Image (cartoon, grey):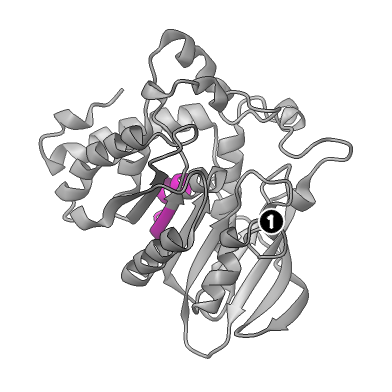
Amino acid sequence: MADLAKLKSLIEWPAMRGVIEKEVRNLIGPLRTEKVDLQLKTVDEVDARGYVRRRINFFVDPWDRVSAWLFIPDGKEEAPGLLCCHQEVPQGKDEPAGLEGDTRLAFAQHYAELGYVTLSIDCLTAGDRTTARKPAYDTKAFYKENPKSSYVGKMLSDHMSALDVFDEVKRVDTARLGVIGHGMGGLNALMLAAFDDRVQACVSSCAFTRFATDKNPQWWVEHDGMELLPGLAHHIKEGKYPFDWEHVLALAAPSAILVLCSLSEARFSNPRSVQKAVSQASKVYKMLGAGSALDHFGHHDGHRITPETLEVADEWFERWL
C-alpha cells in the first residue's frame, strides 16, 4: 500500500498517484474507455415552482439504457450541474427527486430550487433497473455476466456516463460540475470525484470507514445479496489492503471534497476513521496548493442528513461551484 506519509515533495506525487490508481482499478475492475453515444431522449416533463422536471433516458454503455430525472431551474443563465447519487434504497433515483423516500435526501429537487441543473439516475438493480422477480441490489446476475468487474466499478462507469448528459443540456456550465450522495450514494460520489476530473466539487455523507479499521469489512464483499467489492475478500483474510479511503480522497485532489460523518453512529462511517483518512489525504491537497479544498464535518444526528448538514453542503457548493 502506498504510504502518503512518506510523500516528501510534489515531484513524487505523479508516480505514487499512478500506483494508487492502478491498485484501485485492479480491485474495482475495468472502466469504460470510450465515450458512449447517449442517444438522450426526453420522455415527459412537469413544470414545478422554480424548475422543470424531465424524465429522460440514455445509454450508459452500448447495451444498457437507463432512466433518470433531470431538473432544470428557471432562468436563462448557465448554471452549475450537480449529479445526485441515491443511497441504498429500492426506489433509486426517485428519492433524490423528492418523489419517494426521505425528503431530506431529495437532493435533486433541493438543488434545482437553489438554481443548479441536477440529475439523478438509477444504479443497476435499483428503481427501474431491478430484475424481474429479484430484490433490489441482488447483484448475482451482474457478476454472472461480468465476473471480472465489480458493482462499485459498474456504478462508477454509469455515473461517468451520467456526467456526459450535462454536455447536452444547454443551460449547464460544464466547467462547474459537482456530485453529492449519502450512504452508498456518498461512496459513488467519492469514486466519481476520484476518477473523473470533470468533478469540481463533491459532498459525500456517511460513505465509508477505512478498511484497516473497519470492524466488519466483510460488508464490502457481501451485504444482503449485494456484492460491492468481491475482490476485497482475500485482502480481508490477509488483513492487508492494496489501498484505503485516504488514497481515494487523494486521487480526487485538487477537486473540492467535503466529507460528512456522524459522531454518534459509527456503524457505517466511523468518525475517527474518517478523520484519519481526511488528515492523511490532506497532505496531497496542501502540496497541490489546495489545502482548503478537503474538509470534513462531524454531526450528532446519526446515519442521516439533517437541515444543518444540508446547509453545510449548500455552502460548500456555493463556495466551490
- List x then y, in percent, for residue 114: 49, 77
Image height of 102 relative to 167, above or below: above
What residue does disc 1 label?
Answer: 101
Image height of 228 relative to 205, above or below: above
Q: Which residues are magenta?
A: 190-203
Q: Identify the residue shown where x is 64% and y is 56%.
A: 102
Tell me which corner region of the image, top left, top right, bottom left or bottom right, holds residue 30: top right
Q: Residue pushed farthest right?
A: 133
Instruction: Name the quadrant of the C terminus.
Output: bottom left
Q: Is residue 211 visible?
A: yes
The residue nearer to you, when weighing 213 against 11, is 213
What's under tag 1, amino acid-wise?
Answer: Gly
Q: Secondary structure at mark 1?
A: loop
Q: Is residue 198 visible?
A: no
Q: Identify the residue shown where x is 74% and y is 27%.
A: 140
- List x then y, in percent, for residue 143: 70, 28
Q: Residue pushed farthest top?
A: 238
- List x then y, in percent, for residue 49: 64, 85
Tell me which corner region of the image, top left, top right, bottom left or bottom right, holds residue 150: top right
Residue 197 on the magenta segment: yes
Please indicate whether residue 78 sits to the left or right of residue 247 in the image.
right
Image height of 26 relative to 193, above or below: above
Q: Residue pushed farthest left?
A: 8
- List x then y, in percent, for residue 183: 53, 44
Residue 14 on the magenta segment: no
Q: Identify the residue shown where x is 49% and y is 27%.
A: 27
